[in-house]
Amino acid sequence: MILKNAWRNIWRNKRRTLITIGSGFFAVFFAVIMRSVQLGSYDKMIGDVVNSYTGYLQIHDKKYWNDKVIENTFVRDTLLEQQVMQVKYVNAVVPRLESFALASHLNKTKGALVIGIHPETENKMINLSEKLRAGSMISTAEDGVLVAEGLAKYLKLGVGDTLVLLGQGYQGMSAAGKYPVRGLLYFPSAELNGRMIYLSLASAQELYSAYDRLTSLNISIDEPIHLRLVEKKVAKLVDAQKYGIMMWDEMLVELVQMIQMDNMGGIIMLAILYIIIGFGILGTVVMMTTERMREFAILVALGTHKSVLSLIVSVETFFLGIFSVITGALGALPIIWYFHLHPIPLTGVAAQSMLAYGLEPVVPFALRWDFFLNQAYVILAIILISLIYPWAKIAYLSVVKEIKH
């Protein structure tokens, strides 16, 4: 009976009800789409950086992260790699030897980050073959290098040319070598695209006289949501006195801080939208309550308890709020679904700006059910706040005064 009466009451003034639901619809619609774009951009940004370099989880020597020199490497432990690979949700365990070197060709020289990799395993984590723009991939036994396009352009290198590397090896040994360029790679990040050189792990270990040594084991997982669980399981496998374990957000602090600052702006915009919808619902509740005070007084005089009237008004308001959430979410869902599968490409100045920050020039949409549910929680909170007015008016209702009014 309460549900039936509440349903009839909200449609007594159809125009007002439709206006209220309409304002809620547009607020939820724009809030969900805006949040989808914002979170999609964060996911894309994190994916581009993490999958291009660090991986989601990294194991290294305890002293390596604070002092990234080749002396702080560790002896490769294949048993540990096998154990980590068996952890649920782990896709790949990628061994690396990273160090600095001067890269030279003809009369051009530039500092570069040299990374020794196992090509097949590395490809599983960062899709290295998809970044290939010219030439071919290197193999495990091949004595050649892959060079980032930006660095190759600066050094005037092409496929087939010879690159000279000069640096310092393990325990003060000299590191010098000449390598044929097998392929050119492209990275969205301008910083990575201007300094990356890949060669086989065996070649890197020979170059730096760091035989059978690694700087890190980089771990790729299937979904970021499983990161904390994987980290806990991996931590049980390693010697905490010898190794350090870091997640991507600990390694990329600047990226995390940038996302947090941008996220605050998005939250402020959402707050403005919900203030609008909050006043819309409150205005409707105030009008519905004020124009029905005489009706409430008569019902109380006939024996209806005030708590029942408060419950009916509450159900009416919940109907309005839930309709706003459902219609807004259903209206936004097809748009988010489509652009989640087909991100909007950017061109011109906007594309150049994103490329300058190392991001792919697209507008991605995130498809997450949690931010649909969050809208329902916020609307519920707004409804509860709005109900304070009718509850108070009904609680202090003067039956004689309202009937005579």
Image (tube, rainbow, N blue to C red):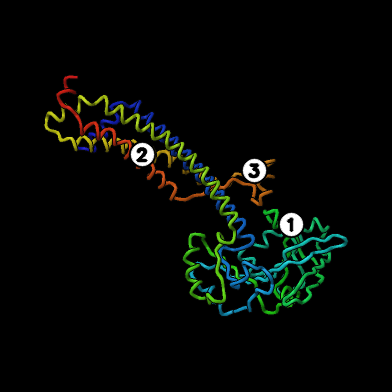
Q: Which mark is residue 346?
A: 3
What residue is at 31 percent from the left and 40 percent from the top?
A: 384
Mark 2 crowdedness (10 Å alpha carbons): few <14, some 14-19, many ≥20: some
Residue at the image point whose x is 48% and y is 74% from the top = 236
Q: Which residue is mark 2?
A: 382
Q: Quadrant of residue 66?
A: bottom right
In contact (CB < 8 Å): disc 2 and disc 1: no
Quadrant of the snapshot with the N terminus: top left
Q: Earlier in the sequence, mark 2 or mark 1?
A: 1
Q: Residues under labels 1 and 3: Cα distance?
A: 23 Å
The CA distance from mark 2 to mark 3 is: 37 Å
**Residue in view at x 85 percent, y 60 percent:** 108
Q: Cα distance, mark 2 to mark 1?
A: 51 Å
Q: Is residue 393 above or below residue 104?
A: above
The numbered disc on residue 322 is none
Above-or-below relation of 338 to 216:
above
The percent coordinates of residue 393 (x first, y second) are 24, 31
